[in-house]
Amino acid sequence: MSVKKTGKMGLLKRFLPYYKKYKWILVFDLFCAALTTVCELVLPMLVREITGAASSEPMSLTLELILRCGILYLVLRLIDTAANYYMASIGHIMGTRLETDMRKDLFGHLQKLSFSYYDSAKVGTLMSRITSDLFDVTEFAHHCPEEFFIAGIKIVCSFILLSSINIWMTLIVFAVLPPMLIVLWFFNNRMKEGFRDSRKQVGELNSQIEDSLLGIRVVKSFANESVEEEKFKEGNTKFLKIKSRVYRIMASFQASTRLFEGIMYIVVVVVGALFIMKGEGGITVADYMAYLMFVSTLLTSIRRIVEFAEQFQRGLTGIERFCEIMDIEPEIADAPDAVELSDVKGDIEFKNVSFHYETESKNVITELDLDVKAGESIALVGPSGGGKTTLCSLIPRFYETSDGEILVDGKNIKNVTMASLRESIGVVAQDVYLFSGSIRENIAYGKENATDEEIREAARLAGADEFIDALPDGYDTYVGERGVKLSGGQKQRISIARVFLKNPPILILDEATSALDNESERLVQRSLEALAKGRTTFTIAHRLTTVRNADRILVLTENGIEESGRHEELLARGGLYSELYKMYSSI
């Protein structure tokens, strides 16, 4: 898993390809921006024309000239209105589409990342990246090219037009721009850092809020509401400090802009007046007014960039955080020549397999060899930390082996597509996850486009049909957030129905009954036995009575497979399994 470092120009290069689908919309948007700019630049020239005629030869200021200038400006205003409408509507929609495309890519990339990434990632932070981080991309995508394009046209055209009037005064006026831009660039960079810290803290806050609200039952059972409020207050106060720092930088940014605006106006007023007073440079009163209007137009454009500076920085920060996730390479991916795994029988072989987690150097599994025949039932027991869950997680490639290889039907799982491999494996875990929705939708998650008959049959096989039919809304019953409206046994049977519907040849049962009461365990165990029939099954269990009928029981410890055999054989040996069984039976 690696992350690339990206500078400001690099971020823009990464962002530009998203315009490709909408290039003609962008081109016409910029054409409209050019039209609005032309309309603004023509007004000072019209005023100069009228003022020049009035001051030099009052008789030349005819009604015809006035009407001609007025009609021209009216036509330009109508064009400006239509162009602005396009920019405000279609331009913004283009920005929203860009944001939507980026969100789709980001969500798709997150789906590809391995379990190891989610072991340390915070869901609240990821939600912030997918949602709020990309909100301001809309404004950035739309206004950034527009505003810089308009500012560029105004600066270039103003310089050309003003130079045609008086080159020296124009150079003096434009000499104020470089120091102005340097100062604004300095504050701009500091704002970017502030917004990055702000975004990061928002993600932390989201993560903390999610953690507290999802665990609200635990919070209330320990009467720890005040503890959670204090934790939230600490994070919220940190966010306040960061935002306060950002707004102080913004205030400095805007104050500097106003200072330079004032300097530019003073330069035009004083220098222009001196030229007129001395009669040098060929500046007339009409030229003087045109200068003031051109400078006003130029400063309006710069002021708009200043006003959008916050959005620019928010958008750029959103793009940066988007790229940070997109640059994380999935640890596990399909090989270029990966093939589909089809007609799976269920033979599984571990050859000299070793594994350690990314954050640890010590192996959880070391040089393990294991051969499991199709349809065989394997039970994994032993003390915590022996690698039972890890071993089962390696089969669907939730984690990648450090050494050795795992074969399914004689094919190395690294040489087959992950989708086809995982379609052949069903997992029933202790911690059942039900999606917010109906029972029907949760069961149907096991098979795309499942019919109502197939869903009901899966529920029947899982022993879930009776309690579902007894519910007021039956299969359309809303299960609540994470299935909170159902009991543990009911949730587990729905998860079993989901796997029945998937109908995989390989089954992994990870302590599927350990969190249930005796009655629920009895019902679920019966469903699991029906589910496991005819499938290659790996069962992880601490309640050893649930695995007595397994074809083979493996006792896993830090040293690997300590014992292997059937229940009766292992009891007769009087080894670790016998000790664990006696310990459990005496409870």
Image (tube, rainbow, N blue to C red):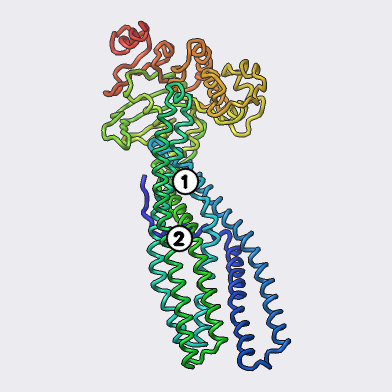
Q: Is residue 133 above or below residue 513?
A: below
- Of the residues shown, which amino acid type is indicated by label 1? Arg
Q: Which mark is residue 484?
A: none
Kindly indicate the quadrant of the structure image that contains residue 477. Answer: top right
Image coords of residue 400 (percent x, y): 37, 36
Q: Secondary structure at mark 1?
A: helix
Instruction: Residue at 55%, 29% (x, y): give it.
Output: 481
Secondary structure, mark 2, is helix
Near-viewer residue (299 or 117)? 299
Q: Are marks 1 and 2 in contact (CB under 8 Å)?
A: no
> The C terminus is located in which quarter?
top left
Q: Is residue 298 left or right of residue 325?
A: right
Give the residue pinned by disc 1: 129
Locate residue 128 relative to residue 55 in the image: left or right: left
How packed mark 2 is, by other alpha carbons closer than 10 Å (few <14, some 14-19, many 20 or more), is some
Residue behind mark 2: 12
Q: Position of residue 369 (x, y in %)?
A: 32, 26
